[in-house]
Amino acid sequence: MTAPGPGVLSPTRRSLHGVAELVLAGPQYRRTGTIRLRPRAHGFGTIAEPDLRVDGSRLVADDRALDLDGATAAGLGAAAGVEAGAPADLYRGGSGVRLDEVLRIDESAAAYLADCFALGDAALRALASAETPVLWPEHFDLSITVDEVNYGVSPGDEWLDEPYAYVGPRRPRLGPFWNAPFGAARPMRELGGLDPLIAFLHEGRERAAQ
């Protein structure tokens, strides 16, 4: 995978996070009581009603494909037949995207982030086959929890402005492997593929058990 520059990656990530939170997770929560999302081919989508998904730079609702770039969450929601808005009173933070904010999506950046989520989904299932990875709308990260340790892939955030894999024990660990305030992290561009990603997660599991 070739990582795009931060000039297109950061605004694309912010906009996709906003769509995940405001157009997918919020309406799904109000209808079914869950905010969980999942990776889909070329993007991500809901796990329950309404059936919505992001495919590259478009929102797919029924048989309609709506361009994300230049749209707003409010407009996308109206076109998809849902009331856009974040899940209420569940968490602090979130995407920070306003309902009337104009979204900016670069196709190459969106494809790269989708690839990162797809690799993360495959690696997490290889690590713990009994667990189902969840894409959470609060931090826009894909994760599972096993024995009080969080394993996941983030598309980037204020701590590291690029996609990274992480291992986050609820009880802090000591040692050079644990290089992040929340545990251990490795940029996806350095891992480079599925096998190194799986190896990093397995190493994290072994070290967390010590």
Image: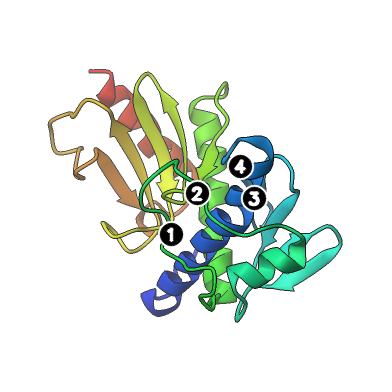
CA separation, marks 2 and 4? 11 Å
- In the rendered image, which residue does mark 4 sit on? 29
For the residues bearing labels 1 and 2, Cβ distance under 8 angstroms: yes
CA separation, marks 3 and 2? 12 Å
For residue 183, what is the image quadrant? top left
Residue found farthest to the right: 63
Q: Amino acid at mark 3?
A: Pro
Name the element at disc 1.
loop
Q: Is residue 57 visible?
A: no
For the residues bearing labels 3 and 4, Cβ distance under 8 angstroms: yes
Question: Upstream in the sequence, badge 3 or badge 2?
Answer: 3
Q: Residue 155: x percent and y percent?
A: 43, 56
For the residues bearing labels 3 and 2, Cβ distance under 8 angstroms: no
Q: Is residue 162 above or below residue 39?
A: below
Which sits in the foreground, 92 or 121? 92
Q: Residue 49: x percent and y percent?
A: 74, 43
